[in-house]
Every structure is written in structure tokens, then in C-alpha cells.
């Protein structure tokens, strides 16, 4: 490569400084120079872009991009699983409510409570249910506390020992007091 230093003189004492002009002897030298200059500029630009993104190298960028894609795929999978879980939870709650209603009906049907008192009996049984007491235990307790015996469409309180007859209205009043 041939170097030519061109100086231009002005009217004052300080001549302007001009970069050295480079002339290439062969096309091969020119191509080599352009390749290095282009590679240097692209490397510099790549470094600036990576620096702006907070990444040290291209391989680190590829690794982070791969992880980002995996995270995106997992996010979609989680959303799908959440929807499936919500559907199953809804189905479970529906079946559980039907089960509880059937269990309640079965337990309450075990006791011979006059039709006019069934709603009151059911209310008392439900009120007695707790974490320690099941619906079966509550129904048994309410039924025993009322000591109901059905005799010829009349209710007798106290069973065989007292033989006190009570009308439907009096029985409703007694159930309300409980």
C-alpha cells in the first residue's frame, strides 16, 4: 500500500490537518482492508447492541433467547393446566353438592318425622352439624331430644312413659324453641 500525505496550506500559519490518504497497490489489498474495516465496524456495532441489552456475548444472547422461548411455552402450558384444573374443580364441586344433598335426604329419610315437621327437623339437623359432628349424629341427636313417637296420627312426647298427646301446632312451637 502506498501512503500519500496531502497537505493543504491556508493563509495563516496553522495548516489544516488532513488524514493520510491510502492508495492500494492491488485489488487484493483493497479487499483485505475493506473486509477488516467492515468486520471491525460490525463487531463494534454488535458489541454496542449487546451492551445495551446487558448481554456479554452472542452465545449468551442465544442462551437467553432459548430460555425465553421455553418460558413462553411453559407459560402457555400453565394456562392450559389452570383452565383444566378450574373445569375439574367446578365438576368436583357440583358432584360434591349432589352427594351432600343425597346424603342429607338419605339420613333424614331414616327418621319417621311427620310431614308437617320435616322442614323444621331438617333445619335443626343442619344447625347441629359441625366439624366434630356429622349429619347422621346431628339427626340422631335431634330426633332423640324430641323423643318423637307417632301414634295414630298424633304425636306423643316422652314415648310410652308419658303418653301426653301433642297437636301439630304445639309440636311446631316446640321445634321452634329448639
Image (spheres, rainbow, N blue to C red):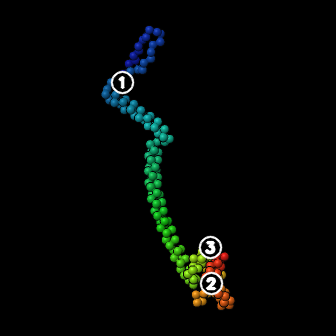
Query: Which image quadrant: the N terminus?
Result: top left
> Which residue does the image show at 46% across and 57% down from the upper left?
79
Q: Mark 2 to mark 3: distance in Å?
A: 25 Å
Q: Position of residue 135 (x, y in %)?
A: 59, 76
**Mark 1 Cα shell of 10 Å, populated few (<14), some (14-19), many (≥20):** few
| Residue sitting farthest toward the bottom | 160
Q: Secondary structure at mark 2?
A: loop
Quadrant in the rendering for residue 39: top left
> Which residue does the image show at 44% across and 54% down from the upper left?
73
Q: Secondary structure at mark 3?
A: helix
Asked if residue 140 shows in the view, the reply is no
Q: Position of residue 113 (x, y in %)?
A: 58, 83
CB-based contact (under 8 Å), mark 3 and mark 1: no
Earlier along the polypeptide chain: callout 3 or callout 1? 1
**Mark 3 Cα shell of 10 Å, populated few (<14), some (14-19), many (≥20):** few
Query: Which of the numbered marks, if any, corresponds to residue 127?
Result: 3
The residue where tag 2 is placed is 167
Q: Nearer the viewer, mark 2 or mark 3?
A: 2
Earlier along the polypeptide chain: callout 2 or callout 1? 1
Asked if residue 121 shows in the view, the reply is yes
The residue where tag 1 is placed is 1
| Residue sitting farthest toward the right | 162
Query: Which image quadrant: the C terminus?
Result: bottom right
CB-based contact (under 8 Å), mark 2 and mark 1: no
Amino acid at each position: 500500500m502506498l501512503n500519500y500525505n496531502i497537505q493543504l496550506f491556508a493563509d495563516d500559519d496553522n495548516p489544516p490537518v488532513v488524514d493520510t490518504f491510502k492508495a492500494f497497490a492491488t485489488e487484493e489489498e483493497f479487499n483485505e482492508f475493506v473486509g477488516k474495516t467492515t468486520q471491525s465496524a460490525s463487531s463494534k456495532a454488535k458489541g454496542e447492541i449487546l451492551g445495551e441489552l446487558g448481554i456479554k456475548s452472542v452465545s449468551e444472547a442465544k442462551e437467553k433467547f432459548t430460555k425465553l422461548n421455553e418460558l413462553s411455552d411453559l407459560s402457555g402450558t400453565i394456562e392450559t393446566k389452570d383452565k383444566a384444573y378450574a373445569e375439574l374443580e367446578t365438576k368436583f364441586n357440583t358432584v360434591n353438592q349432589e352427594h351432600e344433598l343425597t346424603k342429607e335426604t338419605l339420613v333424614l329419610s331414616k327418621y319417621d318425622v311427620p310431614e308437617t315437621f320435616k322442614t323444621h327437623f331438617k333445619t335443626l339437623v343442619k344447625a347441629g352439624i359441625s366439624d366434630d359432628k356429622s349429619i347422621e349424629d346431628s339427626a340422631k341427636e335431634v330426633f332423640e331430644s324430641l323423643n318423637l313417637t307417632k301414634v295414630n296420627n298424633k304425636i306423643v312426647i316422652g314415648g310410652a312413659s308419658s303418653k301426653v298427646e301433642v297437636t301439630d301446632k304445639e309440636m311446631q312451637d316446640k321445634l321452634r324453641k329448639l
